[in-house]
Image (cartoon, grey):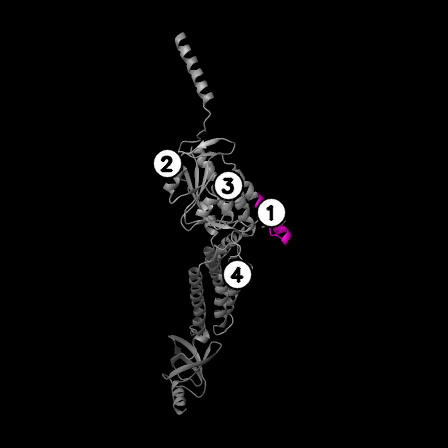
Amino acid sequence: MNRLNALLICGMIALGVGVGTSRGPAVHGSGPPARIQIEGAIDVPTAEYLERSLRVAQDSGAQCLIIFLSTPGGLGEPMLRMTKALLNSPLPTVIYVYPAGGFAISAGTYITLSANIAAMHPATTIGGAHPANLFSMPESGQEGEDKGGGRAKPSSDVSMDKITNTFAEQAKVIAKVRGRNVEWANQAVRESKVVSAEEALKLGVVEIIADSPGDLLSQLDGRKVTVAGGAQVVLHTKGAMMREIPPSARERFLHNLANPDLLLILLVLAGMGIMFELKSPGAILPGVVGGICLLLALYSMSALPVTTAGVGLIIFAMLLLLAELKVPSHGILTVGGVISFVLGAVLLMDTSVAPAIRTSWQVIIVMAVLLVLFFGFVVGAGIRAHRRKVGTGGEGLQQARGRALGLLAPAGEVLVEGERWRARAESGSIAEGEEIEVVGQDGLTLLVRKRSVERATGASS
């Protein structure tokens, strides 16, 4: 027993010495790196996705979170949430601007600067972080805040200068904390400077240029990073298999709504559904679908840099097409509606705010053709209905043919459309069995005439 106690004491002393002399960098998590993909506009679902992924990666023991990023910018408030999450993360974070042709513009620049390690594919760009390129300003603590809690809009050049100064200082602080080029961060905000991956590496904006995810893992291996709290972490990623953290169904759905092409499609479907319901009240389904599409379009417009002129032209186009249903304009309103729709679709996105976000011509053309076809179907059905001969009631019996069931001098009975009717001869008398034609109706009595009279009149004329 004494020998066992001595061994335990020696072991504890040795462990204590080992712990006390171990001054090297700590390794947080030994699991495979976690990976997420962020594409498109930065919005609230994107911020929620990043925050949740950081928690999941840390709980699963991942040694770092690698964020594959390609964005033209986005909303200001979600961008601030994402930079805050990256700066305060106890887990090492890596931003990889990927794939080829991708970019980290506007809000993407702030997010990239906030990561522990910034990497880019050779065929990508970064920069253009002027506050005017953010669809929405911070909801609090900034000049020009909308008192209603909506998007903050600078009311004057002075307000814009204050906002620019605020964002420039923020970018400089982030760059300084992460050991990156502070002067370039300032230029990216104030001058909207954009650089390629090669230039970014030379300027000290990023640390790695990687041709592929595998190349990125090889270059990350052995790097030391300082996470929130001051702890140093060594990455061991060479040959590791990244574990993907997919977005939730809700995050994916809401993020996909922030798409200019989808916004245009939703507006068209909303217009067609509501127009069909107004044309045929009681159909219900088209109205319900149109209403849902309109509500989804409103959410999409809140996350995209839409223009008032673009939305107004599209609404005007729908009104012109709807007016064509009521006013015979020989197609003039239809042509005007299509022209207004195309112009509205082209002007729908404010490209001065986010040059990379715009509606594709393919979608514009397809939607314009779809509108014309739909309108042709609705209007054509109405025209055909107006031209169709009435088949019921007194109007339906106009010019109907039959025969006299007895002598009409002038009243009697006739057989028309397989039914017996009381009838009165228009002039003269009609013998039994003679063919007759209906020329009018007086209550429940048909006014008829001999078909022979009609033929004789046609021949003489």
Q: What stretch is highlighted in magenta?
A: 152-169
| Marks 4 & 1, CB-CB < 8 Å contact | no
Q: In which quarter of the image is residue 411?
A: bottom left
**Nearer to the camera, 232 or 136:** 232
Which residue matches tag 2? 238
Mark 2 closeness class: few <14, some 14–19, many ≥20 residues within 10 Å: some
Amino acid type assigned to the residue bearing label 2 in the image: Lys
Q: Which amino acid does label 1 sit on?
A: Asn
For the residue marked with disc 4, what is the amino acid?
Gly
Q: Distance between the residues labelled 4 and 3?
A: 40 Å
Residue closest to the far top:
2
The quarter in which the C terminus is drawn is bottom left
| Quadrant of the rendered image containing residue 245 | top left
Q: Mark 3 points at which residue?
A: 180
Q: Position of residue 448 (x, y in %)?
A: 43, 82
Q: Is residue 138 covered in magenta?
A: no
What is the spatial separation of the Cα atoms under label 1 and label 3, in whole angstroms?
Answer: 19 Å
Element type at marker 1? helix
Between the C-alphas of marks 2 and 4, the distance is 50 Å
Query: Residue 250: in sight, yes or no?
Result: no
Q: Earlier in the sequence, mark 4 or mark 1?
A: 1
Callout 1 crowding tier (Cα within 10 Å): few <14, some 14–19, many ≥20: some
* Residue 142 appears in the rendering: yes
In terms of secondary structure, where does tag 3 sit? loop
Of residues 127 and 78, the one nearer the viewer is 127
Q: Which mark is residue 165?
A: 1
Judged from this view, the residue extending furthest toward the front is 202
